[in-house]
């Protein structure tokens, strides 16, 4: 089984993730997807033979230059009303390019935005296509995700200022405590 198929299978076998994907699809968001930690953590839990549970925010991303940033709250409110058991985060990635650095280039799509998340295994997204099939957004592939290997994307390796963001996230998240087999590296 290829890495992409393996990640898709893990998502498809996780009822909560499938429910979330259906809820996102029902929002009809341009390039709407589930991204980052919910997928990464679920994959790591399965690979580590741990019970699967959503332990982080449910990150909903989309890309709509026509929608004002304030619309994120309306989408969040609707999702929260439909499924209050999840810790929703909703972001129109049009507005997120400068989150860590003011001089970062603008994102051009959800895939571009996901590809700029700090860690390689966090650069993952999923959505349901028109045939209700899980599709992945994996700008850096899934090899690191499936190997329990965590490193910053090249953008965050360029200097100490950028690496500091990666280091702070690793210190805050304490992933090695949850996943002892995780391999952390800065390159």
Image (cartoon, rainbow, N blue to C red):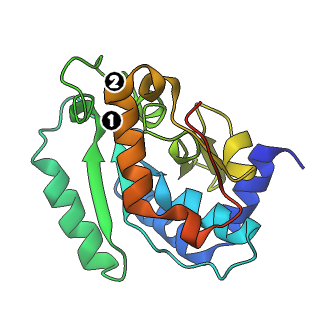
Front residue of this view, candidates 55 and 110: 55
Residue under label 1, please give it.
Answer: 63
Q: Is residue 106 above or below residue 133?
A: above
Disc 2 or 1, which lies upstream in sequence?
1
| Quadrant in which residue 76 is drawn | bottom left
Q: Position of residue 133 (x, y in %)?
A: 66, 53
Q: Judge depth for marks 2 and 1 and give the one in front.
A: 2
Residue 147's place in the image compared with 16, above or below, is: above
Residue 107: numbered disc? 2
The residue at the point 75 percent across, 49 percent down is 147
Which of these two is toward me, 169 or 7? 169
Q: Is residue 43 above or below residue 85?
A: above
> In the figure, is residue 13 to the left or right of 5?
left
Q: Are marks 2 and 1 in contact (CB under 8 Å)?
A: yes
Q: Can you give x and y, in whole percent of width and height, for residue 135 in the image?
A: 63, 46
* Residue 18 in sight: no
Q: Which residue is pictured at 55% across the width and 50% down the height? A: 126
123 left or right, relative to 143 = left
Task: In the rendered structure, find residue 33 and report the number of the disc placed on it.
Answer: none
């Amino acid at each position: 089984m290829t890495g992409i198929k393996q990640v898709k299978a893990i998502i498809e076998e996780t009822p909560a993730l499938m429910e979330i994907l259906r809820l996102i699809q029902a929002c009809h968001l341009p390039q709407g997807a589930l991204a980052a930690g919910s997928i990464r953590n679920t994959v790591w839990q399965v690979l580590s033979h741990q019970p699967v549970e959503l332990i982080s925010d449910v990150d909903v991303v989309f890309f709509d230059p026509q929608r004002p940033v304030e619309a994120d709250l309306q989408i969040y409110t609707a999702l929260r009303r439909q499924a209050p058991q999840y810790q929703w985060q909703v972001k129109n990635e049009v507005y997120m390019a400068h989150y860590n650095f003011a001089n970062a280039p603008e994102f051009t799509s959800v895939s571009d935005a996901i590809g700029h998340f700090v860690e390689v295994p966090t650069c993952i997204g999923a959505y349901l296509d028109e045939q209700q099939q899980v599709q992945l957004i994996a700008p850096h592939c899934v090899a690191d995700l499936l190997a329990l290997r965590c490193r910053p994307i090249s953008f965050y390796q360029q200097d100490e200022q950028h690496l500091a963001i990666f280091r702070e996230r690793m210190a805050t998240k304490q992933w090695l405590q949850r996943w002892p087999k995780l391999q952390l590296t800065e390159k």
